[in-house]
Image: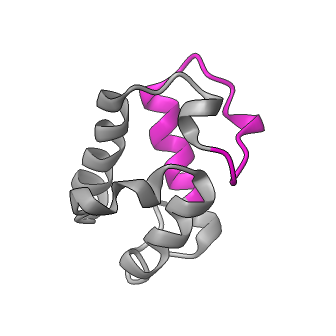
Amino acid sequence: MQPEEIRQVLLDILARIVPDEDLSTLRDDVAFREQIELDSMDFLDIVMELRKQYRVQIPEEDYPNLATMGGAVTYLVPLMKDVKAPA
C-alpha cells in the first residue's frame, strides 16, 4: 500500500470509531487526541482494526508512533507494503 492509501485506511477506521468527528481537517503533525475525541479504548480499537483487517501486528511499545496521522502513516508504510488496498 502507498502512504495515501494507508492514510485513507486510517481515516476509514477513525470514521467508524468516532463517527461524529469532522476528519476533513485532521492535521498530520498534531496528535489525534488533541484534534478529536479519542480515548485510550478508541485508540486500541484502531490497533485492533489494523490487526483484524490487515494482519498488522503493532507492539505496545510502538503505540506512540501512531499518535499522529503523519507518524502512523510513516510507521505503517513498511508494515503494509505488501498489503493490497481495499477495493
How far from the left and from the top, in percent, is residue 53? 29, 54
Q: Residue placed at 30% from the left, 37% from the top?
A: 45
Above or below — where is 2 with respect to 21? below
The residue sitting at 25% across, 46% down in the picture is 48
The residue positioned farthest toward the right in the image shown: 25
Is 7 on the left-hand or right-hand side of 67? right
Q: Residue 44: where, in percent of width, then height?
A: 29, 39
76 to the left or right of 44: right
Q: Image point 49% across, 76% down: which residue? A: 77
Q: How many marks?
A: 0
Drawn side of residue 10 relative to residue 42, left or right: right
Q: Quadrant of residue 54?
A: bottom left
Q: Out of 9 and 41, give the one closest to the viewer.
A: 41
Task: Residue 52 in the image: state x and y as whole percent.
Answer: 22, 52
Q: Quadrant of residue 56?
A: bottom left
Nearest the eye: 59 or 76: 59
The color scheme shown is one colour
Q: Does residue 55 sit above or below 8 in this rendering?
A: below
Whole-percent x and y of residue 66?
Answer: 45, 55
Compared with 24, 55 (above or below) is below
The magenta span reads 7-30
Q: Is residue 17 magenta?
A: yes
The residue at the far top in this view is: 20
What residue lies at 69% left-to-right and 53% top-to-bottom?
28
